Amino acid sequence: MAQACTDIAHRSRAAAILRRVAAYTGVTVATVGLVTAFAGSRAHAAEIDYDAASASEIQDHIEDLESQRDETGAAIDGLQAQLDAAQAVVTAAAADYGSSDVQLTYVTAAVQSADDELGAKVSTLVEYAQEQSDKYAEAQEAAERSDGLETQIADLEAQAGKLDAQIQEAEAAYDEAAEAEAAAAAEAAAAEAEAEAAAEQEAAAEVPASSSSGSAAEYSADAATAAVQFARDQLGESYVFGAAGPDTWDCSGLVTGAYGVSGISLTHSTWAIWDETSAIGRDDLKPGDLVFYNGQGHMAIYIGDGQVIHAPKPGDVVKVSDLDMGMSIDGYRRV
């Protein structure tokens, strides 16, 4: 019976030690198991081919890595808190029972506090020895648990280091991919703008090479014939700068008067008339078309057979001249 009671007492003390260790360290078997499962089975972010991936895909990969890194950091913090608590148990036991001076102080106090009876003193010493043994067992358990926690923390810290390196690599790949995509987009936009500009320029610069193509500006024979006849009727009349009839003319004044008989209104200015008329090629020239010279500073009316009628300059008169009269030709226009 005494032996059974002794066994029960030993088991009770052992259970109490485990309960106290758990209380001191804040560690339960379930908690340690969960942390171990995290360290061993945490899913890694999916592999990715940075050369083939888009910037958006790389960004998603970075977010996965950062999430995993945060979870790893949280697990390290939790384990570190448990390690600190376990080490505190070891430190406390060493402070209370670890040195001979401390032990002597406890023993002396225990003996002095007991009754003078020898049995009472012995009983007190036995109780102290048991308490010391219990504290030693607690410290031993905490030390062993500390070793395990330190190993888990080291593993997780190694994993965190790898994740940091992967995040850095992914961020560099993202910058490169984003820069390449931006350059490609800019190049595509420039090419599109260039194509649009070329199309607009081609449409605006349509100048037919010959009347046989059928693409020359529309020719109004009646107005053109009337303009030529009007100009012929003014032959010999004097040139006066800024004049537009009825008996004196400058070059653009003669043209406005010639087309005015058909109700066609043109501005009394060579540069304005250039803008108000349509471009044609030299091979498209017909009587009534206009020829511009000297930077659009002079103009004449084509009358056919390589000749024009114009009001040349002060001191001169309205007359017929060769189309190529020695002045540079800027172009040919049709009203």
Image: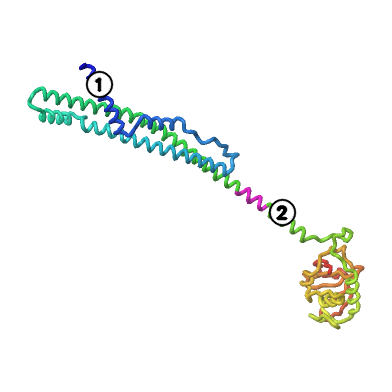
Front in this rendered view, residue 63 or 231? 63
Q: Quadrant of residue 155?
A: top left
Three-letter code for the amino acid on which mark 2 is drawn: Ala
Camera-side residue of 312 and 38 = 38
| Numbered mark located on residue 8 in the image | 1
Q: Residue at x 69, y 53 (%)?
A: 192
Overall secondary structure of the magenta section: helix
The residue sitting at the bottom extreme is: 247
User: What secondary structure is found at the residue carrying circle 1?
Assistant: helix
Q: Which segment did they paint magenta?
A: 182-190
| Residue 204 % position (x, y) | 76, 61
Residue type beneath disc 1: Ile
Residue 84: x percent and y percent?
A: 32, 36
Q: Taking 153 as reference, is 242 left or right?
A: right
Q: Residue at x 10, y 29 (%)?
A: 112
Image position of 192 with respect to 135: above or below? below
How far apart in space, not on screen, are marks 1 and 2 (Cα)? 96 Å
Task: Classify mark 1: residues with Cα within 10 Å, few (<14), some (14-19) or many (20+).
Answer: few
Query: Which percent across, then down, holds residue 66?
Result: 48, 41
Residue pictured at 54% horizontal, 35% vertical: 47
Residue matched to label 2: 195
Residue 310 part of the magenta-drawn span: no
Up the image or down, 155 lies above or below 206; here it is: above
1 vs 2, front mark? 1
Mark toward the start of the polypeptide (1 vs 2): 1
Choose top left, top right, bottom left or bottom right for residue 4: top left
Question: Which of the numbered marks, if any, corresponds to residue 82?
Answer: none
